Amino acid sequence: MSKELGPTGRPLPNFPEPKKRKPGLPATVIAMCNQKGGVGKTTTAINLGAALVETGRRVLLVDFDPQGSMTVGMGVNAYELDQSIYHVLMDREIGIKDIIMPTSIEGLDLAPSNIDLSAAEMRLVTEVGREQVLSRVLKPILHDYDVILIDCQPSLGLLTVNALTAADGVVVPLECEYFALRGVALLKDTIEKVRDRTNDDLQIIGLLGTMYDSRTLHGKEVLQTLVEGWGDLVFHTVIRRTVKFSDSTVAGEPITEYATNSPGSASYRQLAREVLVRCPGA
């Protein structure tokens, strides 16, 4: 009997229920990266993090975007922060444990950010080992978490290179429209340069189609083109367009909490299982 075809046009596998993680392993660090803005990086980081917590993982969200969208999306006022990830990067006297805050979801913590982080890029240029600063910052907490998700800014500058250098793998959210496809080759070049120069263990975990509308031929064609070009690197899970994502952001909650039985929640729970299959150590 033939398997049901998923939205990517491939047979949809059954993703097993996640097993318990082996104790004593350091966290798997995943960067959400795409130089194009508005493709769902922050939404994916928040909701994937919340879905991973439901599988028993302890997760840290690192907001590494000066816009502070992840911080706001978790219900924190970015402008009222006394300290943020910027202060940890710039001041060796401040450790990341000093800024981590719990969220409304047990097992999901946040390292917040705000516009201060925009100054870090200029200040880091003169630093020795400037690409490894985030790696150094995260090192003391690698055994406190199972998964660390870094939300990158929409550029391929020094902050993004820091995130890629600190990461074990990259998830690339891509809006299902043609302009989103054009920048992926440039991102792949950057990932390969980072792999050559600062992090030879870096892997692309997968490309994730977001804001998908199954009613349009355009969205289906973009997914088909993505699979033709990237093959099995494209996640079987696809995130469909829904107003619930915007509503949950305004509420300052992941969609798994705000609309727990919605199709959006189901998609991110499936993505969490697929990520865990692709990252066996997580």
Image: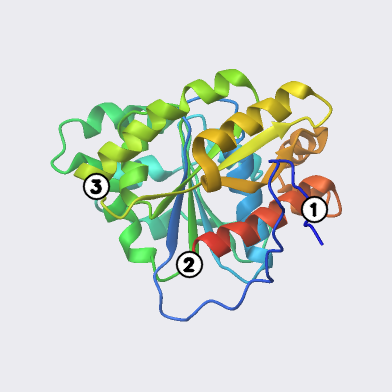
**Residue wearing tag 1:** 4
- At horizontal 30% and vertical 32% (from top left) the residue drawn is 158
* Scheme of colours in the image: rainbow
**Residue 21: x percent and y percent?**
53, 76
The amino acid beneath tag 2 is Tyr
Dot 3, crowdedness within 10 Å: few (<14), some or many (≥20)?
some
Name the residue nearer the viewer: 59 or 5.
Answer: 5
- At horizontal 80% and vertical 49% (from top left) the residue drawn is 258
Dot 2, crowdedness within 10 Å: few (<14), some or many (≥20)?
many
**Residue 26: x percent and y percent?**
39, 70
Q: Can residue 60 be seen in this view?
A: yes
Identify the mark at residue 206; answer none if there is no mark.
none
Identify the mark at residue 145; answer none if there is no mark.
2
Whole-number angstrom distance, CA of label 1 to CA of label 2: 36 Å
Q: Is residue 146 rendered to the left or right of residue 55?
A: left
Name the residue nearer the viewer: 240 or 58.
Answer: 240
Whole-number angstrom distance, CA of label 3 to CA of label 1: 44 Å
Q: Is residue 72 rendered to the left or right of residue 168?
A: right
Mark 3 vs 2: CB contact within 8 A? no
Where residue 177 sits, quadrant-wise, is top right
Work out which residue is located at the far bottom of the displayed protein and give it: 23
Mark 3 vs 1: CB contact within 8 A? no
The amino acid beneath tag 1 is Glu
**Circle 1 sits in a helix, a strand or a loop, which is it?**
loop
Where residue 140 sits, quadrant-wise, is bottom left
Work out which residue is located at the far front of the displayed protein and give it: 1
Dot 1, crowdedness within 10 Å: few (<14), some or many (≥20)?
few
Figure quadrant of the N terminus: bottom right
**Residue wearing tag 3:** 132
- The earlier-in-sequence mark between 3 and 2 is 3
